[in-house]
Image (tube, rainbow, N blue to C red):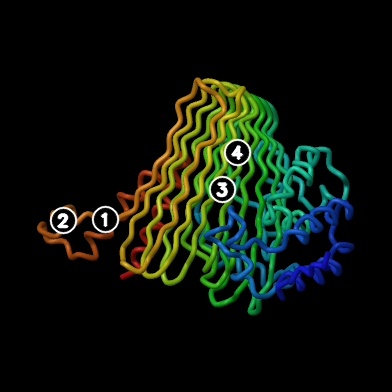
Amino acid sequence: MADVTTLRTAAETGLSKLFEVQRLKLPGAAIAREEAFRYFEAAGLPHRRVEAFKYTDLRAAVREAAPPAEAPEPETARNAVKAARGFAGIEAARLTFVNGHLVPALSDLSGLPEGLEVVTFAKAMAEGHPLLDHLAPVEQTRENPIYQLNAAFMADGAVIRVEAGAKIERALHLRFVGTGSSPFSTATRVLVVAGEDSEVTILESHEGPDGIAYQPNDVLDVVIADRARVLHSRLNIEGDAAIALSTVSARLGAGSHIETVNVVTGAVLSRHQLYLHFAGDDATATVNGAAMIRDGQLADSTLLADHAAVGGISREQFKTVIDGDATGVFQGKIIVRQVAQKTDGKMKSDCLLLTDEGQMMNKPELEIFADDVACGHGATCGAPDDELLFYLMARGLPRAQAESLLVQAFLGEAIEAVSHEGARAAMIAETEAWLARRG
């Protein structure tokens, strides 16, 4: 048989060179990083022939491998954070990351609520923190190239432990800010371990400079013990040239609950992956998303809800508003294992097209191996209702204002699910700002 040579793109070759330089500089076990990168290297950047990336071709989109960002100078970090708007003004304990590095001087590490422990991920990796055992083994995630790339290059982040029985009333804000005048990449990892009967609210905001093709890749791993509750709100207002990759992975214990909502207005290309594993009986999940995109943007929301225990309930609802020639992508799958009787799963994706040039790709799936379940999925796509527009305009509203009201009502169903009042208000404000920029 003839030898087969795998052609590699400039970005893939660049990533290999960067890894050889970085692997001995980064904290933690070099062997685990090596294994993660070898899994990534074997597959390369995912492309349209890979089913999970059929509509989001990263091999075509990522032309060059941006170098990992260095820790910023104190003044640079202060200026970047001063201009940050994500969840600004909300009363919260804050962990501030600038260019992927935790900045203690701009964080609240000393004023954390009782029952909440935070260790920097760099320190946890360097010291072999026992909570890191909660992370999934590398081989279990080998088919997830974005996750593997993060595992190979992750430089900083946080390990967060919520004590059993602790009810953390003050939200914890993970503030990620990028700054610079040339392309850079970041790889952050946050691990949240919520003890039995605990409750915590996590806010995430991600933003950076316009006009710079930076490449963030962030991962949030959540381990939720029995009867614990984790409320999570995420805001993507990245710069207009960013290629933003993100993953939320959650493991749910018996009787536990997760609420996670992701709002997207930023990045020229974004892919947000959600993986939920129902490991304990009677766990529940509310998963919502709202994307508002325009002018060539692509926003991809990919979801897998894996029900592997009895009585799990999952509700997934995604709303996408498309203006200009933007592209929306929703891929969702609910898997019900044979043991997961009494599962109740509902998944829906709705899209509002404001122009004829936009497009939406919907791919909802059910994979059911149990017989006593109630599951369903649906997808809709269409333009604003002409009769509703006429009704509003007949009462004196200009068309643009009438259309904005319809868009806000359309998105409201997803955003109103946010339990934290301040986060909900901030997300509504982002939708209003996006509509105002639309004119």
Left-right relation of 363 to 195: left
User: Decide: marks 2, 4 in contact (CB < 8 A)?
Assistant: no
SS label for mark 3: strand
Q: Which residue is mark 2?
A: 392
What kind of residue is marked 1? Answer: Leu
- The residue tagged 4 is 276
Distance, label 2 to label 3, CA atoms, is 36 Å
In the drawing, what numbered circle is on residue 405?
A: 1
Q: Give how far apart the Cα atoms at labels 2 and 1 are.
A: 9 Å
Q: Are marks 2 and 1 in contact (CB under 8 Å)?
A: yes
Q: Residue at x 79, y 54 (%)?
A: 36
User: Which is more toward the observer, 43 or 434?
Assistant: 43
Residue 116 image label:
none
| Residue type at the position of mark 3 | Leu
Identify the secondary structure beneath mark 4: strand
Mark 2: which amino acid?
A: Leu
Residue at image coords 73%, 69%: 12
Q: Residue 72's spot in the image, x, y percent?
A: 72, 69
Q: Earlier in the sequence, mark 4 or mark 1?
A: 4
Locate residue 177 relative to residue 403 in the image: left or right. Answer: right
What residue sits right under mark 3 in the picture?
203
Q: Residue furthest bottom?
A: 181
Q: Residues within 10 Å of mark 2 (few under 14, many from 20)?
A: some
Of the two numbered discs 3 and 4 on the same chain, state the one appearing first in sequence.
3
Using the image as rendered, state which of residue 361 and residue 303 is in the foreground. 361
Q: Give the SS element for disc 1.
A: helix
Regarding mark 2 in the picture, which secondary structure is present there? helix
Label 2 or label 4, whichever comes before in sequence order? 4
Examine the rendering and report whether any part of residue 218 can be seen.
yes
Q: Position of residue 373 (x, y in %)?
A: 49, 24
User: Sequence-wise, which precedes: disc 2 or disc 1?
Assistant: 2
Cα separation, mark 4 vs mark 1, equals 33 Å
